[in-house]
Amino acid sequence: MTDTTTLVVAGAGLAGVRACEAARRKGFEGAIVLIGEEPALPYDRPPLSKQMLTAPPGSVEVQLRPRSVLEDELNIQVRTGVRAIGLDTGSRVLQTSEGEVEYDELIIATGAAARKLPEAREFSGVLALRTIEDARRLRGHLVEDTRVVVVGAGFIGSEIASAASKLGLRVTIVEAASAPLVRSLGAEVGALCTALHRAHGTDLRLGTTITAVRARLGAEPDGLGRYPVAAVELSDGSLVEADVIVAGIGAVPATEWLQTAGVRLHEHDGGILCDANLAALGHNGRPIPHVWAAGDVVHWPNPLFERTMRLEHWTSAAEQGAAAAANALVQPADRRPYSTVPYFWSDWYDTRIQFVGVPQAEEVVVQHLLDERGGMVALYRAGERLVGALTIGRPDLIMKYRRLVASAASFAEGVDLHAGAVA
Ligand SMILES: Cc1cc2nc3c(=O)[nH]c(=O)nc-3n(C[C@H](O)[C@H](O)[C@H](O)COP(=O)(O)OP(=O)(O)OC[C@H]3O[C@@H](n4cnc5c(N)ncnc54)[C@H](O)[C@@H]3O)c2cc1C
């Protein structure tokens, strides 16, 4: 342990909470201040696009820890509704909407914000999904006979479509690419995802974009001057009636508050560039003393894959929170690089999709599993190595693939594992 007396965590999501918990678990007895801009106590996001959209409103518990655990057991000063607005790394001061907070060590865990459709400003019923408030708002729209248009067939968009379909609503997905997830996971998996949506009656419009939104004729604007949506016009000339439009078009790291802080951001994805220990880098490419980052906001070199990456996955956000806190509180010689085999899951209709590893591959081999459990697996090959695996409807297999990818196993070993599941 160092002689740190105050650990400040900016961003009270999963990575932020895990950072605080890890600090206490490691025996840190100083002050911990957890600062989050949302009014709610830290909560879990995966249920927002799943159970929260299908269960009766108010019936799903998403809080990560009760207030009593955070404040009394862990002795964390939780400041909700407080926004980090600037950072002076020289004098170790975090500027917030409620004044300055001094730190000895700072962990930035401000996550990402959902990209919004520009139409959101002009029309009511144009939504995005990132926060618990977004989920409540969207749930309120998912009532009988609502016609739902989802923009983007990525994970969040597809989960929203699945939830709306489960509620018996008419759902159309508008996707610019030739298949869902084709850019991130390849054409083979894209085709499987297309089939999954269509098998559940979702109207999937591929290779199309929205060219215009039509307002309901004769409707009054709401208090913000926005008119209710009635339909969307698509680039193929078709018209789709809609009562609600939901954007599933990705998220951007929440770093706008760091613009003058001297923190280096990735030129394409905007994540905070970190070293392997999750220390934030300055413009000179060297770690900024006492500043760390964790979660969706981080772009770091993952030693297991010899490349840098930014993930938006629950598991890595949780692990990075703990890893950043551990490194912040020990002597430099005791710091450890954070490496992981990326893992995420997603629930579409009643099917679980899981992915481990990285999708950058020379070949993707898809196999329909013929044992009594069924399902599918797609294996990703780079050179002779198994670098990734995706399963559809086979949660029993995914961690076995993760171990293979972690041990730099050959592609042949991956195929053998999967041949065992077929037998
Ligand atoms: C709807 C949804 C469903 C998901 N489902 C899955 C899934 O099924 N499987 C999976 O692997 N992953 C899933 N994820 C991804 C996973 O939830 C994220 O990777 C994880 O929440 C990231 O945690 P984080 O702490 O880095 O960021 P966040 O959870 O975004 O938390 C960051 C917090 O910081 C706050 N903040 C931002 N800026 C500031 C500021 N300037 N000052 C103070 N506070 C600030 C934000 O308001 C937020 O509360 C899902 C994400 C979403 C949005």
Image (cartoon, grey):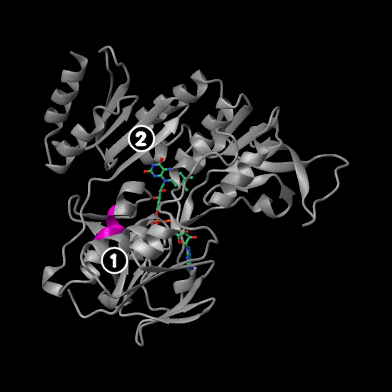
For the point 67% across and 42% down, the residue is 211
Question: Disc 1 on helix, strand or loop?
Answer: loop
For the point 53% across and 43% down, the residue is 248
Per the picture, the main secondary structure of the magenta-coloured stretch is: helix
Residue wearing tag 2: 186
Q: Residue 408 location, x and y as percent?
A: 12, 41
Q: Image quarter for residue 324?
A: bottom left
- Is the C-beta of the residue carrying label 2 under 8 Å from the nearest atom of ligand 1? no
Amino acid tagged 2: Gly
What is the distance, in whole Å, between disc 2 and disc 1 at their CAs? 28 Å
Please give the label number shown on residue 274. Answer: 1
Q: What is the residue that sits farthest to the bottom in this orientation?
A: 91
Residue 269 visible? The answer is no
Is 132 positioned to the left or the right of 313 in the image? Answer: right
Structural crowding at the residue carrying mark 2, measured as other residues with C-alpha within 10 Å and reported as few (<14), some (14–19) or many (≥20): some
For the point 52% across and 70% down, the residue is 82
Depth check, mark 2 against mark 1: the one in front is 1
Q: Image quarter for residue 354?
A: top left
Quarter of the figure with the C terminus? top left
For the point 21% across and 38% down, the residue is 402
Highlighted range, magenta: 319-324
Name the residue nearer the viewer: 203 or 54: 54
